Amino acid sequence: MSSSDGRHYLTTPIYYASGEPHIGHAYTTFLADTLARYHRQTGAPVHFLTGTDEHGQKIQEEAGRRGVEPQELCDAMAERFQSAWSDLDISYDRFIRTTEKEHQGVVQAFVQRLMDRGQIYEAEYEGWYSVHEERFFTEKELGPDRTDPIAGRPVERIREKNYFFRMSAFQEDLVRHIEENPEWIYPEKRRNEVLGFLQNPLSDLSISRPRARLAWGIPLPFDEEHVTYVWVDALINYLTASGAIRPEGPPGEQGFEDPGGSWWPADLHIIGKDILTTHAVYWPTLLMGVGLPLPRRILAHGWWVVGETKMSKSLGNVVDPLDLREQFGTDAVRWFLLREMPTGEDASYTPERFLTRYEELANVLGNLASRVSSMVVRYREGRLGPGVEGRGLDTEIDLCLQRVSESMVRLRVHEALGAAMELAREANGFVETTEPWGLAKREGAEDELDETLGTLLRTLLVLSALLLPAMPGKMEELAETLGLPRVPTLDQATDLPLSELQVRKGTALFPRSDLLP
Ligand code: ME8
């Protein structure tokens, strides 16, 4: 996934400001955060973007239901998301809100640019519209009872004047791009889905809504009576946050010809499979329409369900990551979601599964950290002498480093975490076979005990570096127990002289679940 210049611009979807954050939003955001932290660890410049999607009918209606102005609702919800992300240790560089002035300017410049290039025309439109999905569906796409094929909600027959983007003109170019860049959409299943969709003729895209029907949006620069279709508005957020477009500049200097010096193009858009068409069809063709480069990669992950059931407000089964955090701590929530869902596949939350993953943390990683630190304190007063290398598990460590880095490049975060946990298991096995408590009693075994404890400390150093992106808080805690001011880099972890560590007996990293509040 690395870009040619080594920089990483990573994005999550911007979440609708009409609903509360739940584990689905948290998963996407954890995935992006973990990748962002992983790349920062290697010293690469990273720009990690998330935010809220604040225009459109959905927001207008939710505000109406609550009896508040749309802006008031958005202000409150943007704060909810920011505060959730802060509690869950999300290290975004930019939180964008589509009601920001800067974004409004970029959207207008973008749409004007499409108009200037002859990519927009006006026409009467009649079709089946889903308020819930905020888009039209073709007759063919509708469910048997005339419901939208995504959420199964009712659709309405609507006839109105709209502005259209000549999306169909880019169909061939898009198909070619996907065929020539097999890695562009990941995983392959999703890529095939998009290619399948593109086997049918692509229609043009309605990019406006009459203000009379929907007031809450960004006015078109060339017709005040229409606002920009919320999906066009929302997708452009990625560009706004890149700093590529300067709406105030004269044509030619607005950044459309040359986005150089900005973060554009994005290296990776991380999204759920529900919004694949908008990201892999609408967005790239819109970019082609204005003449900007396409994002380098799209990752469309799978869907979280609860038990066997779709998560939904009306079913009352929405899982709140903040409730889980309350009980198990931030990093346990991060661990569960990232470890349980194979990238790209669906996964299911149940309290039992959560507990099983938690116990993996407590019994393997937590147990290793606690037994090693207490032995180093008991047998060596917390510090090993100079010259102890701790090389007993080097083969396992090397293999693990390789597996983690391969998995991260392939965006298989769950595998990277699995590989790190495997190393912790091997280290626990090493404790069992070397029996440091026996060496401590045996005369003449001092060096052997040093090397054994050193090997275990070395492994803990490496694990703290490997697991930092997924569990930043707990890995800081672990580093502190080892006497370090911060989590070491991978190079430091493998090379640091062990005599620099001053180990103390820490409190349990992951307390036993029956001892939790
Ligand atoms: O679609 N499982 O916002 P949204 C996994 N505003 N991921 C889930 C999920 C689940 N059950 N539920 C939600 C929008 N997600 C638009 C996006 S982007 C330019 C505009 C995650 O609030 C997943 O990432 O409905 C999904 O794509 C996203 O939240 C949808 O968030």
Image (tube, rainbow, N blue to C red):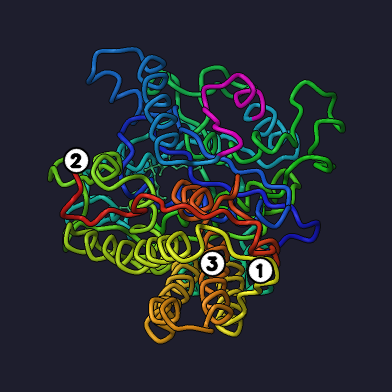
User: Is 172 a magenta residue?
Assistant: no
- Mark 3–mark 2 Cα distance, whole angstroms, equals 47 Å
Q: Pick whichever, 278 or 422, lies toward us.
A: 422
* The label number, if any, that marks residue 174 in the structure image: none
Q: Amino acid at mark 3?
A: Leu
Q: Pick whichever, 228 or 514, lies toward us.
A: 514
- Mark 2–mark 1 Cα distance, whole angstroms, equals 48 Å
* Residue located beneath label 1 in the image: 494
> SS at mark 1?
helix
- Whichever of callouts 2 and 1 sits on the residue coming sooner in the sequence is 2
User: Is 100 a magenta residue?
Assistant: yes
- Mark 3–mark 1 Cα distance, whole angstroms, equals 10 Å
In the image, is 361 to the left or to the right of 198? left
Q: Position of residue 232 (x, y in %)?
A: 54, 38
Residue 140 location, quadrant? bottom left
Q: Is residue 172 visible?
A: no
Q: Position of residue 515 (x, y in %)?
A: 18, 51
* Residue located beneath label 2 in the image: 313
What residue appears at the point 23 percent right and 46 percent down from the top-left corner? 319
Q: Nearer the viewer, mark 3 or mark 1?
A: 3
Mark 3 Cβ and ligand 1 under 8 Å apart = no
Q: Pick whichever, 139 or 500, lies toward us.
A: 500
Q: Position of residue 291 (x, y in %)?
A: 76, 47
Q: Which residues are magenta?
A: 92-106
* Residue located beneath label 3 in the image: 457
